[in-house]
Image (cartoon, grey):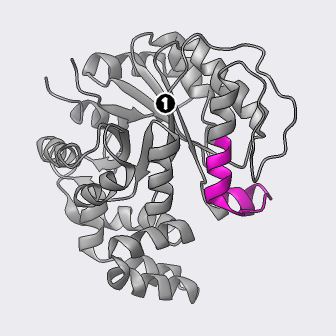
Amino acid sequence: MTSPYGITIPLGGPLHAQKDRLLECRDLGYTDFWSSEADAADGFVPLAMAAAWVPDVRLGVAIIPAYTRGPALLAQSVATMAEAAPGRFAMGIGASSNVIVERWNGIPFEEPYKRTRDMVRFVKQALTGEKVEGPFDTIQSSGFKLGRVPKQVPPILVAALRPGMLRMAGRESDGTIINWLSAADVARIVPEVGAGKEIVARIYVCPSEDADMVRGLARRLIASYLNVPVYAAFHEWLGRGPQLQPMWDLWKAGDRKAATAAIPDAVVDDLIVYGSPGECREHIARYMENGVTTPTLAVLPYGMDAQQAVRDLAPQG
């Protein structure tokens, strides 16, 4: 059986013109297409298009925030994707961040642990086809019963960073979705989730041997994430506080340029996979050796053609 090897979609370019590129990804050996939802495409439409175009890959969303859709609507969306791609869809739910939830969507980012747990429980109950009864601490919904129940219930995964959410993922769901961590960090994550669970990791990859170029561009991406409170707390827990404190201090002082420059090379090298295509594959393999079951590449085509980067990083059989 082929080992899972995913790629983040949509790829660059218009959504309507991606069929041939997605088919090529399948032919190159990518087994999974995983979407996301932040400030670009939503999490479901690219998967729905891929479901129709490429009938033999697995599809997943990593992730839909637990706040930005009502519980009934989210259950409908999950059921619809499960019906569109029976047996090959996985659903990721997570707290997201205060930036996406509160700043962009105007929704209070309160009790993220409970909200994520409650949305997972709601969706799982709804997918049974029975009336959803609860109880829930953070959801007010009465009398909802799903009108189209998929024949094959999809796995539900919880995006998690620190121990509380990771343990909840292990108890309440089929696994976890992780990102912005090193291969070595995975070994600390897996025991918190527990045995027998799926571990999906979004891994940022650039098949370039120009270390200075990759580090310079990647610092901007790292700064945009690791100054978000949930990710800052995550890296404090992982032990990178001393390395990242100068960056955090400068960012809070309003000097974003200096803050970005203050990210040490060692942190970039931990969090970004780069080098020759062979070196990248070897690095990705270390994530899997430490417990990742489904590596999902987020390709950073720094200084190169994006589709060629996808080709260069394809698994070798």
The range drawn in magenta is 100-119
Count every numbered label the image shows and give the total: 1
Residue 103 belongs to magenta span: yes
Question: At 65% across and 23% down in the image, what residue appears?
Answer: 127
Question: At 69% across and 36% down in the image, what residue appears?
Answer: 122
Vertical arrangement, residue 68 with respect to residue 125, above or below: below
Extreme-right residue of the structure: 142
Image location of residue 273, percent across then percent down:
25, 53
Question: At 37% across and 81% down in the image, what residue appears?
Answer: 241
Along the line of sight, which residue is nearer the eye, 239 or 140? 140
Image location of residue 12, percent across then percent down:
48, 35
Along the line of sight, which residue is nearer the eye, 50 or 129? 129
Image location of residue 288, percent across then percent down:
22, 43
Is residue 228 visible in the rendered structure shown here?
no
Question: At 78% across and 15% down in the image, what residue appears?
Answer: 147
Residue 187 belongs to magenta span: no
Residue type at mark 1 is: Gly
The residue where tag 1 is placed is 60
Is residue 197 visible in the rendered structure shown here?
yes
Using the rendered view, name the quadrant where residue 218 is placed: bottom left
